[in-house]
Amino acid sequence: MKTTPTCRIDTMCSENYKALDPIAKARYANKLKYLNLKFVNNMRKWPAIEFGHIFCYYIDGSGLYTRKQLLQWKSLDGYNYFQSGHVRDILIWEIDSTCSILKAKVNPSQSPPEKAHICWVAAKITGDIIFCHCTCMAGLGEGCSHSAAILFKIESAVKNGYTASTSTVCQWNQGFSKKHEPSMICNIDFSKPSASRVTEENDQSTRKKKRKIKEPTEEEKRNFITTLSDIYPDSAVLMAFMPVRQPLASNYTAAICSLPRTITYFHHPKYQQYSHAQLMSDCDTILKNVLR
């Protein structure tokens, strides 16, 4: 029979712990009972966490995500941490036959891996999530994106059957980004992993080719206008071809839209050399032509 290790809370000197309210302090102290445990790297002991368990925990528990956000779970920061390889090896310690604790380091998105956050999750063997914790600023709320990344990694392993496989597949647990290599901006893909970037070659092969629309001939235009006039003579589109209401003949002429010229039309560099009298004279001439 396994015993629960204890921890002397009165020896803590953390100012953060002392500043907590009684409820948060008691819950934090309960978590500290499980420090200094012996964790092992064994995926086959992972609890059967599925997406439904994650959904229930964050909706009914921490409230980190809304229902609408979880329906679009591939766009969440926690999922992208997992997809980007920020979650390191997940270790497990079995409290008893019904409950276990899993912990891992999660690399921050904008900081070097040396400043990774330590996260751990308590869950039942059935997959029900009890609580989470993380050393990041939001970790005390038991629902940060780093702890969500661990849950998404476990969920993916369970879904793909890795937790029931041999030790050779356990190498999947070690598949994380160990080091950020510098690269030129032009070679960096800033899209999220869930965005499934499509190359130009694949885009051309999978995308439906746009259908080329053939320009209608004058006869086809004439037949269309004539037919439309017979079916619906009051159609608004006919007003563009028939300014004067009269029966449409076999030929039609489109109404030319005549708009006044803008002031910029009359600009010319030569006017910079004109005197005031010359400018006034040209203005009078232009005005007469416009009002003609």
Image (cartoon, helix red, strand yellow):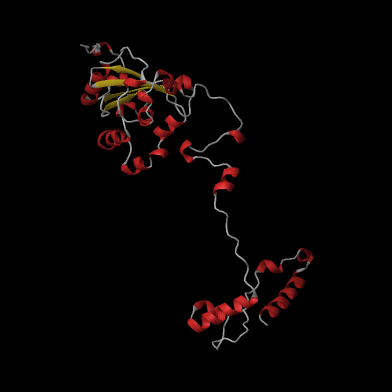
Q: From this viewpoint, which residue is outermost toward the bottom?
A: 246
Instruction: Residue at 43% x, 19% y: name it.
Output: 168
Quarter in which the C terminus is drawn: bottom right
At which x and y percent is residue 25? 24, 22
Q: Is residue 273 above or below residue 102?
A: below
Q: In this view, does 60 lie above or below 220?
A: above
Q: In this view, does 15 lie above or below 155?
A: above
- Please tell me in which quadrant of the rendered image residue 101 appears: top left
Q: Quadrant of residue 239?
A: bottom right
Q: Residue 37 at x, y = what percent?
A: 30, 12
Residue closer to the observer: 141 or 101: 101
Name the residue located 25 percent from the left edge and 27 percent from the top edge.
126
Closer to us: 93 or 107: 93
Residue 256 in sight in this render:
no
Residue 157 image offset from top left, x and y in percent: 38, 28
Q: Nearer the viewer, residue 98 or 28?
A: 98
Question: Quick check: 266 left or right of 41?
Answer: right
Label count reads 0
Viewer-proximal residue among 159 and 79: 159
Residue lying at 69% horizontally and 80% vertically, measured from the top left: 288
Against 204, residue 117 (above or below) is above
Residue 142 in percent (x, y) is at 30, 28
Left or right, residue 174 beside residue 281: left
Q: In which quarter of the image is the N terminus?
A: top left
Can residue 186 be seen here? The reply is: yes
